[in-house]
Image (tube, helix red, strand yellow):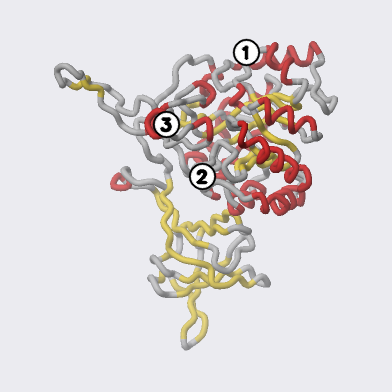
Amino acid sequence: MAPAGSFESLAAALQGGADSVYFGIGKLNMRSRATANFAEEDLPEIVARCHETGAKAYLTLNIIVYDEELETVRNLCAAAKAAGVDAVIASDLAVITHAHSIGLEVHMSVQANVCNMASVRFYAQYADVVVLARELTLGQIRRIIDGIRDEGIRGPSGDLIRVEIFAHGALCVAVSGKCHMSLAAYNSSANRGACFQNCRRAYRVTDEETGNELVIDNKYVMSPRDLCTVQVLDQILDAGVSVLKLEGRGRSSDYVRTVTSVYREAARACLEGAFSPARANAWMERLESVFNRGFWKGGYYLGVTWGEWSGSANSRAALLKIHIAKVGNFYRKNGVAEICLEAGALSTGQTILIAGPTTGAVRVEVKAMRKETEEGMVPVESAGKGETVYIVVPEQVRRRDKVYLLRPRRLEDAAGNN
């Protein structure tokens, strides 16, 4: 299950092979403060795009809801059902019971902090999928899944309850993301999707009486590394997990496509008996090329009781993304893109990323370029800002798509974001 915070990321998720995509609408989701949101009128298009590729569309409605918002919740659920949304992801019982009452499938959010069989039995009245708490060990997860099978616990659909876990992406310092730090500092609640992420900053501890500062080895003591399970995915699937949730509704389309395609390939390899440490290392290299705060491999699932800290507030992506151009045209017959270098230079041998709302994210290794001259089209090795070049691309791109240069991160880039 892949994230989408924009049509660009939605296209990238589907390109990457997502079986389902989750997204938020307006202010009623856990990314309400971010730009990673759609409007209610986008619902039919989102669902249509997902269903065209055989993927399911899941609406996140997993915030705390107040009385004055219940009518908005009901209206959004009605719109979601009318548009053909496949399920609503929720944790508040007001949302859960209403969605269930109108025949809209419910999936329990990680915000519900499901850690035991009693909770699974209770939520089975309303939900067909349960996301287990991120703090459980793989042994605990396996016991819950075995319990579901042994007891035959079924959801409203009549099928056995499916278990979902977070497989990749950012982790909150708080249990199941239930943090109040942003609320205390800014009156902006993480549990309402409005987190300022002040936990990701560097802090000093000062003795108020003496003014002395205490030395902390890692000043980013509340900023966990990102969860990454690709190297232990065979164990996770062997435990009976049905759905792998990939975090990242606030991330770029390149992140979404890369992470989705890596886990798609890894899951398929597990099912086909082709999973190996060597392949896992190759998948790790691809994951390291896009946004990450360093990886905590396996997370709590491997029995570790305390998180690994990032040591940084910024991305550690191996590749830096630099905007250099836009697509002027695409010639479908020969698969050539017209690249207008409006902000930087380009040379053969470099790699670019082309991204757009319909295009998604397409990486291209520039093996050759051509430029129009008075003598006609001629091959060139490089071109500068203000010039237009033509390159062969592996997939369809579109006018006004943005073009980024992808280059290895250098030491001087350490303070920047990707």
User: Where residue 237 sits: x, y (%)?
Assistant: 67, 25
| Depicted 90 relative to depicted 14: above or below | above
Mark 1 vs mark 3, CA separation in Å: 31 Å
Question: At label 2, which amino acid type do we have?
Answer: Arg
Q: Which of marks 1 and 3 is nearer the N terminus?
A: 1
Mark 2 vs mark 3, CA separation in Å: 21 Å
Identify the residue position indicated by label 3 in the image.
Answer: 182
Q: Do the residues labelled 2 and 3 touch (CB within 8 Å)?
A: no
| Depicted 215 relative to depicted 276: above or below | above
| Depicted 42 relative to depicted 193: above or below | below
| Depicted 207 relative to depicted 4: above or below | above
In the shown orientation, is residue 394 left or right of residue 189? right
Identify the residue position indicated by label 1 in the image.
Answer: 140
2 vs 3, front mark: 3
In the shown orientation, is residue 199 left or right of residue 212? right
User: Where residue 403 sits: x, y (%)?
Assistant: 49, 61
Identify the residue position indicated by label 2 in the image.
Answer: 251
Q: What element carries label 1?
A: helix
**In which quadrant of the rendered image does the N terminus lie?**
top right
- Residue at 31% x, 43% y is 415
How packed mark 1 is, by other alpha carbons closer than 10 Å (few <14, some 14-19, many 20 or more), is some
Q: Earlier in the sequence, mark 1 or mark 2?
A: 1
Question: At label 3, which amino acid type do we have?
Answer: Ser
Q: What element carries label 2?
A: loop
Q: What element carries label 3?
A: helix
User: Where residue 86 sits: x, y (%)?
Assistant: 76, 39
Q: Which of marks 2 and 3 is nearer the N terminus?
A: 3
Which label sits on residue 117?
none
